Amino acid sequence: NKRVGTASVASGGGAITQAGGATVASVLNNDWDVVVFQQLSSKAATYNTYNPYLKKLVQAVRRHCPNKRVAIAWQQVWTRTLNPATNIANIVSATQQMCAYNGIDIIIPSGIALQNAKGNATLNPTSGSLLADGVHPARGVAKYVVSAAWWEALLAPHFNVSILGNSFVHTPDGNTVNIGGTGENVETNSVAVTNDNKGLCQLAAVYAVGNMYEVTELS
């Protein structure tokens, strides 16, 4: 029941309620279908930053959530440009150890999906990081691929609708946005999602969900 700060909870009608001084128990006292955890990207490659803390959080979800069939999901994050030590191999290793210890139901392989995209010349023509500020995915291909991984891991199995063949495309608008207080331009390393490359974006996500611990070459 330790107070952890402010929680934002979406109601059934889509409204956001601000609950000052929220506790873990009060946040979890909602009928969640899925609860998603992730590690801070700067620590994601170091397994000993995960536990015993994550284990206790998973136990708290199981204990306090009214939906006793709630699924526990984990977002595997991506390699940060600003910290080369957080390479994808270490992130994968930490994820594997974490899953074996914590009883995670679903892995959302955002990191591998983005790595799949990084290795493709069409999706990453400048061989850049696809990160806006060295930390966060840039708009366009990077955010599209990560979003597609979320869809393919979380929603496709439930609705039996794959991201493959989705018609949505996205061209970044060129606005400057302050990401995480850095003042960086979100369009750095951005690549537009077009009718010509959207299929590759979708494959990057689908391959990641099918093979979440290894980078797959897109063809």
Image (tube, rainbow, N blue to C red):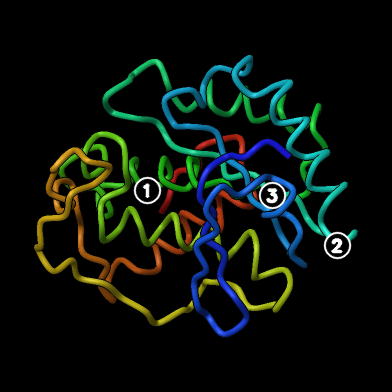
Indicate whether 12 appears above or below 83.
Answer: below
Horizontal side of 181 relative to 212 (left or right) equals: left
Relative image position of residue 27 (x, y in whole percent): 67, 54
Q: Write the residue at 62% across / 18% down.
A: 47
Q: Are marks 3 and 1 in contact (CB under 8 Å)?
A: no
Q: Amino acid at mark 2?
A: Pro
Pair 2/3: label in front: 2
Which residue type carries mark 1? Ala
Disc 1: which residue: 117
Quadrant of the rendering where the C terminus is positioned: bottom left
Q: Position of residue 155 (x, y in %)?
A: 64, 69
> Label 2: how many residues lie within 10 Å, few (<14), some (14-19) or many (20+)?
some
Q: Position of residue 124 (x, y in %)?
A: 24, 48
* Circle 1 crowding by C-alpha within 10 Å: few under 14, some 14–19, many from 20: many
The kind of residue on which mark 3 rests is Ala
Q: Which mark is residue 73?
A: 3
Q: Position of residue 192 (x, y in %)?
A: 21, 64
Give the residue at mark 2.
66
Local SS, label 2 = loop
